[in-house]
Amino acid sequence: MKIAIVGEGGHSKVIQDLISLLNGYEIVGIFDDKYNELELKEKHYIGPIKAINQFCSFFIDTKVIVAIGDNRIRKSIVSRLSLSGSTYITLIHPSAIVSQKATLGIGTVVMANAVINSDTYVGDHSIINTGAIVEHDNNIGDFAHISPNATLTGSVQVGDGTHIGAGATVIPNLTIGAWAKVGAGATVIHDIPDFSTAVGVPGKIVTKKMEV
Ligand SMILES: CC(C)(COP(=O)(O)OP(=O)(O)OC[C@H]1O[C@@H](n2cnc3c(N)ncnc32)[C@H](O)[C@@H]1OP(=O)(O)O)[C@@H](O)C(=O)NCCC(=O)NCCS
């Protein structure tokens, strides 16, 4: 399977490592706006993000992953690329445990040692990061990020674009709204509205603002 990666920052490095562990997967291109033009460099092509459409029409069986950790930037790049959904690949680290009764969207990545249990749904272009525990019956939107070692205990709703910080815990049956942020190490015991930031133990809302 030929894979083109969009983005070459820290999150991309982890995804490159993940792909290197998957039999039959090969990185054929890395696209980032620090590059000006498409060129072959050692084992793969490099080029600006706008070159990816042309690249995919030439190498027609190439799958794409947008490997950018920031949820808003990841979303804006996916919108900008306008690639068909079937062009995107879903990646699961070999050490992750994903229930056969879980559903993962396109362009979503599940990192090392993460666990996703039964009847959990994860939307498109989301990140379930290293060691995150996503228990049963959770529903996670598109462009979300569940950070390393965060825990969604069960039947938690996480909106589109929401970032759950490293090591945070959300107790069962809560709703964390869209484009919200939960601070690293927080323990969330109440619902969090859209566009809000909550921190601490127990989690308290520190900002609530509309962002565009
Ligand atoms: C919660 C978070 C998103 C807030 O970032 P921000 O919007 O820039 O907000 P600020 O840094 O201005 O902090 C706002 C307030 O919350 C406090 N705060 C921020 N993060 C906190 C945290 N994790 N725990 C407790 N308090 C925190 C700040 O001290 C500040 O308090 P003050 O107003 O009394 O000074 C960020 O601090 C955070 O924890 N991000 C998670 C990062 C992470 O896990 N990344 C994983 C990458 S893989």
Image (cartoon, rainbow, N blue to C red):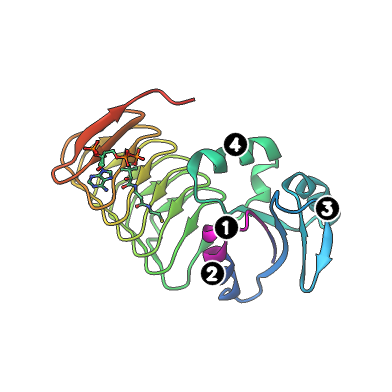
Mark 4 lies on residue: 76
Image quadrant in which you'd find residue 62 = bottom right
Query: Disc 2 marks which amino acid?
Result: Leu
Q: Quick check: is the Cβ at mark 2 less than 8 Å away from ligand 1? A: no
Q: Earlier in the sequence, mark 1 or mark 3?
A: 1
As measured in the structure, the alpha-carbon distance from the residue carrying label 1 to the one carrying label 3 is 18 Å
Q: Nearer the viewer, mark 3 or mark 4?
A: 3
Decide: is 141 above or below 111: above
As measured in the structure, the alpha-carbon distance from the residue carrying label 1 to the one carrying label 2 is 15 Å
Q: Which mark is residue 34?
A: none
As measured in the structure, the alpha-carbon distance from the residue carrying label 2 to the one carrying label 3 is 26 Å
Q: Is residue 208 visible?
A: yes
Give 3 or 85, whichever is nearer the viewer.
Answer: 3
Q: Quick check: is the Cβ at mark 3 less than 8 Å away from ligand 1? A: no
Q: Is residue 82 visible?
A: no
Mark 3 lies on residue: 37
Q: Earlier in the sequence, mark 2 or mark 3?
A: 2
Residue 93: percent from the left, percent from the top?
A: 48, 68
Image quadrant in which you'd find residue 78 = top right
As measured in the structure, the alpha-carbon distance from the residue carrying label 3 to the one carrying label 4 is 21 Å
Q: Secondary structure at mark 2?
A: helix
Mark 1 lies on residue: 9
Name the quarter showing ligand 1.
top left
Mark 2 lies on residue: 18
Q: Secondary structure at mark 3?
A: loop
Q: Which segment is the magenta one? A: 5-15
Is the N terminus in the top left, top right, bottom left or bottom right quadrant?
Answer: bottom right
Task: Determine crowd level at label 3: few under 14, some 14-19, many 20+ residues with C-alpha closer than 10 A.
Answer: some
Task: Determine crowd level at label 4: few under 14, some 14-19, many 20+ residues with C-alpha closer than 10 A.
Answer: few
The residue lying at 38 percent from left, 32 percent from top is: 178
Q: Is residue 187 rendered to the left or right of residue 139?
A: left
Q: Are marks 4 and 2 in contact (CB under 8 Å)?
A: no
